Amino acid sequence: MSNYRAPLADMKFLLRDVFKAEDLFARMPETSEVTEDLVNAIIEEAGKIADNLLAPINQSGDEVGCRYDDGVVTTPEGFKEAYKAYAEGGWSGLTGDVAYGGQGMPKVLSALIEEMYFAANSSFALYTILNTGATLTLSYHASEELKQRYLPKMYEGSWSGTMCLTEPHAGTDLGMIRTRAEPQADGSYSLTGTKIFITAGEHDLTDNIIHLVLAKLPDAPDGPKGISLFLVPKILVDDEGNLTGERNNVRCGSIEHKMGIKASATCVMNFDGARGYLVGEENNGLSNMFTMMNYERLSMGLQGNGLADSSYQIASDYARERIQGRAPNGPVNENQAADPIIVHPDVRRMLLTVRANVHAGRALSLFAALQLDIAKFHPDEEARNKAQQLVALLIPVQKAYCTDRGFEACVLSQQVLGGHGYVAEWGLEQNVRDARIAQIYEGANGIQALDLMGRKTVRSRGELLAVLLGEFDEFIQAQQGNAAMQEYLPALADCKQRLETITAEVIENASSNPEEIGAASYAYMELLGLSLYCFMWQRIMAAVLEARDSGGYDEEYLDGLLKTGEFFISRMLPKAAALEAEIRAGAKTLMAMSAEQFQSG
Amino acid sequence: MSNYRAPLADMKFLLRDVFKAEDLFARMPETSEVTEDLVNAIIEEAGKIADNLLAPINQSGDEVGCRYDDGVVTTPEGFKEAYKAYAEGGWSGLTGDVAYGGQGMPKVLSALIEEMYFAANSSFALYTILNTGATLTLSYHASEELKQRYLPKMYEGSWSGTMCLTEPHAGTDLGMIRTRAEPQADGSYSLTGTKIFITAGEHDLTDNIIHLVLAKLPDAPDGPKGISLFLVPKILVDDEGNLTGERNNVRCGSIEHKMGIKASATCVMNFDGARGYLVGEENNGLSNMFTMMNYERLSMGLQGNGLADSSYQIASDYARERIQGRAPNGPVNENQAADPIIVHPDVRRMLLTVRANVHAGRALSLFAALQLDIAKFHPDEEARNKAQQLVALLIPVQKAYCTDRGFEACVLSQQVLGGHGYVAEWGLEQNVRDARIAQIYEGANGIQALDLMGRKTVRSRGELLAVLLGEFDEFIQAQQGNAAMQEYLPALADCKQRLETITAEVIENASSNPEEIGAASYAYMELLGLSLYCFMWQRIMAAVLEARDSGGYDEEYLDGLLKTGEFFISRMLPKAAALEAEIRAGAKTLMAMSAEQFQSG
């Protein structure tokens, strides 16, 4: 069912009323021309692409999948044409560096667009995201020569990019990679090794594919500090940035048969003396690659949100149409055999849970994207630094929490449809399968939680959290005079208090036993995610109250937002106490069993 | 990967040490010959079928799926041979009525076997389960003539059974079905209508298929009280119970393309003047069908447990073998590049969560199965009645909670493998897809929760719960003298107190607003499920302590059980408080929005 409708009204409300994005853009010279009208025009166009171009080939793409034949990958019918239209529309370089043909737009904008693309067609979206990540890395770290030679074609969408990190024996632990890069007389390198799980490693959408590859130089130090980053084109490029026609020695060995995102080619890539070019300094490859990681991880959270919204649309339409059983307080459809299932409290529980998470997740993603923009564009150094601190804290939560809630949303939406949700026709089972990967790739969610708890919290002794909680405080203070907010604010103050208390406890416990970090990490990520969703709902509710006073919006629309926020506070936020208790339980019972005792009997 | 290992040691421990099944069987004349040795011999044989016959064709069955061609359904390679071996082994009539060729074994026994079959190959298991359900219904409600004609062949496995309930417009609300049954001069009926989602509706495993079909007689009352049950054979049968060779007018119109259980044929069945025979009294079909519902729902919970255990086995093996990163307190594998990932607290969190749920879920399923056996076989009426009350309360929880936890277990296990969990090779993504259906079919879990909260709790004014909590009490009293149990017992007493309090509140609230039932139902089901898992863990831990004193078990094995129980109490049980708070939040915010306000923006 290709009935996805880009959620433009919700997006505009967030940009305009919740985050007042135009004011912010105006304060930063490089984004000063990004007006509300321009933003709206762009997301409306992107919404049409999502609705009319990508959604219609989503289900067929899943059915057919990518095909592999002797090193060649063929994408499903319609993907090539859609990618061409996408590239010709200028979308490929939207946030790109203007010096090389990019359009220099803020991330907030592309975040909204990515959500729509992922919602409409996650497999397709991945081809675009990987290219964006590769160009970002090149624009920050590549030499002027490499940038001039590669970026324009990647921004125009005639070439695309990949990230080649994982190897069969090295996923999370990239320090263990074995791909070697031998320096050549001409200043290039010869790369040899095998990479796996390479999204868009081979396909038929573009004229060339530019691989960014992690590899080890001869005599490089062991571990993560001995890894360098290389650019390896599929087809060799001449000095003017044109294709030579000569194939490089990099070849797709096979594609994975996976649970979902079947129209996205997940490739085994064999580098067999492939010609590559160093990007950035030697042995600094991991760090250089991490420049784009915050952006890529944000995108994964957006995939979770997008598929959650697409699922919500199907389930809420179904619940208003499907006639089955009677309302608890008597028929609402006197003249029909039964009532629509949306009369049932438990169906509403599922829909409202999804709805509350979709809105909060989108708001959190925009909030994080805004920090990325401030960190990049703001003229004031202090503002940039603070935004960078918020980015460091927010991204692992946004990635993990939005993808967890996104998957849950697809599952709950599927549940609303009963047996119909389990069959392919309605699209929900595909959404479940497609959403599942977002919890795994770009750093599995357990790794995000560990990054949040260890590097970002314990190691900073709570400094980054203090910056975020300062934002909570600032909001609470600003709303003190707002009578209508008084019934909601205590929930946010509770979140702040709980986070402060439990964070101090974990930092203290970890000082004597490092295992306490991993023991606390997942529940801590969930607690911070839930608290951030509360913060986002409070901001949305405050904006609703403001908009209601100033007029211009449909009353029913605003009221629906307010009531969803009330549902969140009343029925979803209580989980925070359980998460706190789980964190407090600590490492003891986790570490008690020997590895052998885990064997099943 | 067909490396499933039937968990015989765990099963034997539960039967012998936790539930002392032999003693119980000895007290009931019809099961008095079911000794521990007999039970062990039977489950060992069943384990071999699961490990060696069913697991090896699980992944290939998923890849190929069932094929449909003009009314004919072909199961994947190996299924026919496996079903033949299953039937020839006498498994088809294991719990069947001895008067018609069944073996009269208790449900506890077949519950363990079903778990193993679902774990090894859920698609295959479904063919067997449906037949068991159909024979059970016939043995309770069919005429002597029908029983003699149909049961022996179904017990010997040469014919199989189905349940035809759902129609395109009527799933949960069966009162709306439209299939008609016209009485014929010869005492038979002519059935016309369309049924959907019919598991095993058509296939090539048996010589005949016996459909049990819900339909309406002419002039039957509206709603659920106007539905009758009919037996409709695929191939007509003569008076001696032999095939006539004449095809009945029932035909498979298509099979569904679904998320999982792809080797199980999910059929659209068209009845076009098909000859049928009334089973039980006119207009009492739904009630007659519900005889087997408790058994079928138990089976679905077993599917959840089985796939959870199969997933756990893969994930825990992987976590002990996969080398990646270093332990938080320094290397455990000095001479290798990295440590096995089981050193990480967060990997242990995932594995222990699954492990704790697998053991508790299996125990709860056995506890419920024992009640089914007591209700059927016990010579003492009071014992039978009490067991029947426990069955009524336990089955909806066991069905919903074990399938929810089962799905979650598959997802968590998949997460342990990272990207490898997402590709088909390791089998986990199939387990996720196969487990998902168990939350939906045989009454979606929301319906189970509503049955528990409404019919079983509010309507009985907590009477059934009081019977269950009496069991909690009895256990707590019995353990008062057991010093080693004193640190655990307060957790169970808390569960009891919490359930009593919140149940009284819901009953009170529901008396003025029926919406409060559905508003509380899901969290209530989860709270009761969690509390029952606590009860099961306490019983397991008490049995461990007893077994440790009496000797005969491997110390490490017993210690691993105890530590898993401690993990459950310390880190998983705190969720109870959040569920209580969610229930207490009530219907208000659930019912506030209009149906239109659910539309997305």
Image (cartoon, coloured by chain):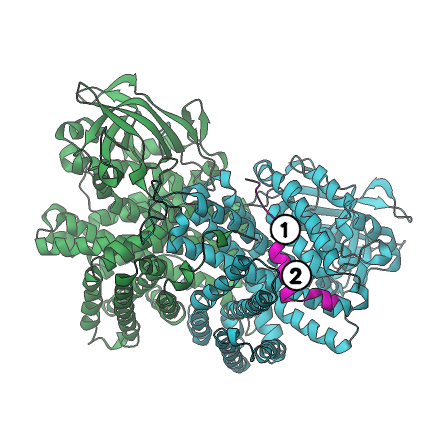
Chain colours: A cyan, B green
- In contact (CB < 8 Å): disc 2 and disc 1: no
Q: Which mark is residue A174?
A: 2
Which of the two residues, A312 or B68, is positioned nearer the viewer here? Answer: A312
Residue in the image at 69% along x and 72% along y: A387
- Mark 1 lies on a secondary structure that is helix
Which range is magenta? A1-25
Question: Residue A79: image x %, image y %?
Answer: 68, 39
The answer to whether residue B198 of the structure is visible from this angle is: yes
Amino acid on which the number 1 mark rests in the picture: Met
Q: x and y percent of residue A116 in the render?
A: 63, 51
Please give the chain letter of the residue carrying mark 1.
A
Q: Indicate which disc, 2 or 1, sits on the residue closer to the N terminus.
A: 1
Residue A487 location, x and y as percent? 47, 74
The residue closer to the viewer here, B46 or A49, is A49
Q: Is residue B219 left or right of residue A131?
A: left
Residue identifier under label 1 = A116
Find the distance from the CA under tag 2 to the CA under tag 1.
32 Å
Identify the main secondary structure in magenta.
helix
Outermost residue on the left side: it is B380
Residue at screen point 22% across, 30% down: B219
Whether the magenta-drawn stretch holds residue A4 is answered as: yes
What residue appears at the point 49 percent right and 62 percent down from the top-left corner?
A564
Image mark for residue B172: none
Q: Secondary structure at mark 2?
A: helix
Q: Is residue A199 visible?
A: no
x and y percentages locating residue B99 in the rendered image: 13, 34
Subunit that carries the residue with mark 2:
A
Quarter of the image for residue A398 reads: bottom right
